[in-house]
Image: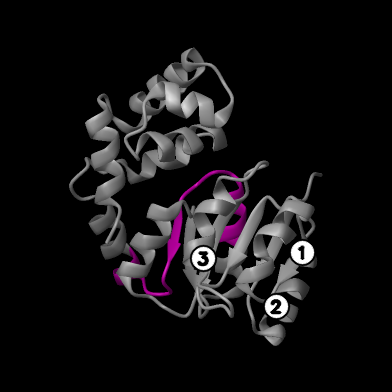
Amino acid sequence: MKKTRIMLVDDHKVLRSGLKLLLDAQSDMEVVAEADDAKHVLTTAGRSSPDVVLLDLTLPNGGGLALIEPLTESSPTPRVIVLSMHNDPAYVRSALAAGATGYTVKSISEQALLSAVRDVARGRVIIDLDDDALTANVFQALTRGHGGTLSGIAKLSDRELEVLRLLGRGLTNQVVAEQLDVSPKTVATYRARIGQKLGLKTTAEFVKYAQELKP
């Protein structure tokens, strides 16, 4: 069985130690790297190639939120789960808009966290604020205004997610192709697939979709 490779990013050593024990005890998971400040996250992730990064938002030498986009634009691309003490919907919106695939609070149960890691590794978008009503409200708020298409993100491949983020900035197929070192025809194919899954057609719709996820 291929294990999900996990990187832990948190400045509290006791918390990281507890998470490592929990995750390494699972037959389908292994912790391959740790970081305790923002300065070393990207280089450590580059060396260890994690499948999933569990990321705190409050870190020395910079915030975790600013790390999400560069993490999810690296290659190979890890999926990012924010593990935070904050259950404010604004933090959730910011994290997902930056490219995170999951957001959980530190007060959730061990089993809920394990389920979140497994689901995100499979490509699902996960939000768990340890409060069913609040979590449901956040999901509804995030999907309101663009046809409930947030759930469609879970259907995208890693490469499609990468293309979506670039198109969401208003970049042309040619520019996206240059950034990804692929042909414009390949980008057009990805764009068509993304549009079909998310119900998007024009560049304006891609940009609007990205903007509506931001606080």
Q: Label 3 sits on what residue type?
A: Val
The residue where tag 3 is placed is 82
Left-right relation of 55 to 150: right
Task: Residue under label 2, please give it.
Answer: 16
Q: Residues within 10 Å of mark 3 (few under 14, many from 20)?
A: many
Is residue 119 visible from the viewing direction of this image?
A: no
Q: SS for tag 3?
A: strand
Q: Which residue is mark 1?
A: 33
Measuring from the top left, give residue 67's x and y in whole percent. Answer: 54, 61
Q: Residues within 10 Å of mark 2 (few under 14, many from 20)?
A: some
Give the quadrant of the C terminus. bottom left
Q: Position of residue 49 (x, y in %)?
A: 74, 50
Instruction: Identify the residue at horizontal 42%, vertical 40% (top origin).
Output: 165
**Residues at discs 1 and 3 in contact (Cβ within 8 Å):** no
Question: What residue occupies the far left of the structure in this picture?
Answer: 145
Secondary structure beneath label 1: strand
Magenta stretch?
115-135
Residue 10 location, quadrant: bottom right
Residues at marks 1 and 3, CA–CA distance in whole angstroms: 16 Å
Say how many tags the image has.
3
Q: Amino acid at mark 2?
A: Arg
Q: Residue 77, percent across and down? A: 62, 44
User: The disc labelled 1 sits on which kind of residue?
Assistant: Ala
Residue 176: say if magenta: no
